Amino acid sequence: MGPLVTQLFGLISLTVALDNGLLKTPPMGWMAWERFRCDTDCKDDPENCISEALFRDTADRLAEDGWKELGYEYVIIDDCWMSLLRDEHGRLQPDPSRFPGGIAKLARYIHDRGLKLGIYADMGTHTCMGFPGTTLDKIEIDAQTFASWGVDYLKFDGCSSNPVEQMLGYPLMSKALNATGRPMAYSCSWPVYIGGLPPNVNYSFLGDICHLWRNYYDIQDSWDSVQGIIEWFSNNQDDLQPAAGPGRWNDPDMLIIGNFGLSVDQARSQMALWTIMAAPLIMSNDLRNLDNCARAILQNKVAIAINQDSMGIQGRRLLKGNHIEVYWRPLSHSASVLVFLSRRTDMPYLYHTSLAKLEYDAGNYEVCLPAMSYLVSLLCTEMVS
Ligand code: GLA
């Protein structure tokens, strides 16, 4: 980091703080990107294109299929919702053919179902898919536009900008969102664009201005991608784990459970690891067509309760060896949770451990919850049979 950037940083940190009481536990909901990408072809692919119908349908499913009661509340629009031009007042506007009712009307639809609306914008000249970006001079007007539409959550990406612009823009957007008076959750992709780790990323400052942040590359629909993310977060846990807490979360990206790339066991593993990591539980799948196993995994009450634990302490990888890893997370009421992740291919494999190896003091412990994979196996079996 050059001296100019460091100086700016000092200035900004004196003037900005985002504390609107939101996201005391990790956000839960649904986001379009991983599953629906930038499909704008509503003529040939009306079911899957990025349009108001997709978000209305998803809101219906969240409200009617038991998701909302479990905490899945945000419906988040990602890239490719915009018109290529701002309106005559310089405001962003949705593509008129795909969002004929406008975003405010969509927000009302979503709010009427007891849910919340998230939207996507990009700190830079263009979004990652080439739609209008939010340059420094547009930050205020865009924050106000989102507030006037009734938006509850902003994902602020960072394509097409340089580190100095990002250093200015992310805190400015935080301030501009605050200034609207509408409580909006603020998700910053900033770390991804500057390497994800200290000293480039100052996580305590980030926690003061954003509720959550993407640290690492985009998730894709494969177990390789999920494993790569788990590996990066665990290898860097000394830097990342202390950054998380109520109102400030690391974001390893969306849950891809229910799509094409994961087996049932791999889907369980993603859910278990995201739970341990106190990660946002933001699905990207097609809730209109979801098989029973995926539903059971995503709706697992034990996993959700652990993910949403009020202490908000992110878990850690305790052990790694023989292609088996053990993860641990402390919970409220003196409880804690362990996850055993096997990457072995010579199953069945008998794994021996001890309290000492798992860093528990000698003594008596009550096992209060059966393992999640066991629970989910039962659920899947019951629902399939
Ligand atoms: C970036 C983000 C993704 C998604 C796309 C949209 O790659 O990391 O999550 O928002 O942009 O273009």
Image (spheres, rainbow, N blue to C red):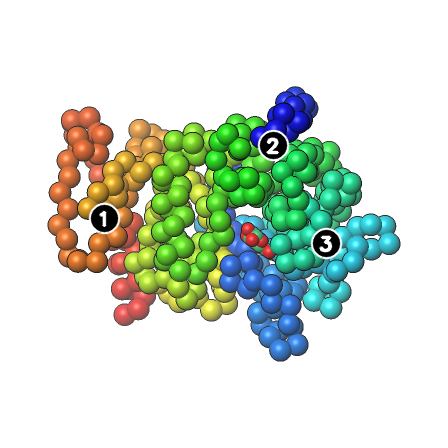
Q: Secondary structure at mark 3?
A: loop
Residue at mark 2: 209
Residue 53 location in percent, x, y?
A: 63, 66
Q: Secondary structure at mark 2?
A: helix
**Mark sitting on residue 132:** 3
Q: Three-letter amino acid code at disc 2?
A: Ile
Instruction: Specify the quadrant that holds the C terminus.
Output: bottom left
Determine the CA span between mark 3 and mark 2. 24 Å
Disc 1 designates what residue?
Answer: 323
Residue occupying the point 36% across, 45% down: 231
Going 29% across and 49% down the picture, which residue do you hit? 372
Disc 1 on helix, strand or loop? loop
Q: Is residue 266 shown to the viewer in this render?
A: yes
Establish if 88 lies above or below 5. Answer: below
| Contact (Cβ within 8 Å) of mark 2 with mark 1 | no
Position of 163 relative to 101 (above/below): above
Decide which of tag 2 and tag 1 comes sooner along the chain.
2
**Residue 370 showing in the rendered view:** no
Asked whether disc 3 touches disc 1, contact meaning CB atoms under 8 Å apart, the reply is no
